[in-house]
Image: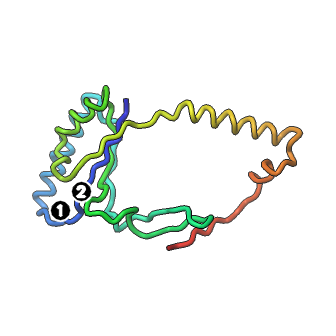
Amino acid sequence: MKYICLGYMEENKWETMSESERNAFMDECFSYDDELRKNGHFAGGEALQSPRNAATLRWKNGKVSITDGPYAETKEQLGGILVLEARDLNHAIQLMSEHPGVRGGPFEIRPAADLTAMLTESERRRARASADCRGSRAHAPSCRRGRRRRSVRPARA
């Protein structure tokens, strides 16, 4: 089963580390990632840039609103994700508790949702709607809606 591991870190903690401390920390993390990969547990992962480089999108008053920066102002910010293959949550916890990244900040571990059935049902509905639009209901409002092109100009907050 897949688990998404969200790694958090205080940004100022990283910035206050010396270059040699940062290098040693990252070398340990990459080494453990290699071990996870070798044993078939590392399914993917990405580090994130600083929250200062983020943009947050929200649906507000019928349109998209964009805010510069992270979603929430907190001391600990999301620093990266790791996709882990594990037997169950306890196994995922066991694997991640040995990850050196835990010393940099907390990891939140969540089971990945299996959307296979939901996707199959959505594909069925969309295929039926597409067939209806090609058939006798071609002039129905629901068929014309998909043909219109609208330019989206998000409002910046």
Residue, far top: 87
Location of residue 6 with respect to 75 vertically, above or below: above
Residue 45 x %, y %: 33, 44
Of helix, strand and loop, which one carries label 1? helix
**Residue depicted at x 68% and y 33%:** 124
Q: Residue furthest right?
A: 136
Between residues 89 and 126, which one lies in front from this camera angle? 89
Which residue is more in the foreground, 7 or 39? 7
Q: From the image, tell me which residue sits under label 1.
A: 13
Q: Is residue 100 above or below residue 59?
A: above
Q: Residue at x 65, y 35 (%)?
A: 123
Q: In the picture provided, is 139 more to the left or to the right than 78?
A: right
The amino acid type of the residue labelled 2 equals: Met
Residue bearing mark 2: 9
Instruction: Classify residue 154 as left or right of residue 97.
Output: right
Q: Work out how far the residue at label 2 is from the one at label 1, CA to CA, in angstroms.
A: 7 Å
Give the residue type that dot 1 points to.
Answer: Lys
Q: Which residue is rendered at x = 50% and y = 68% of the image?
A: 66
Are dots 2 and 1 in contact, CB under 8 Å? yes
Say which residue appears at 37% left-offset and 33% top-offset.
Answer: 2
Q: Residue furthest bottom?
A: 157
- Find numbered disc 2 in the image and state the secondary structure of the residue it sits on: strand
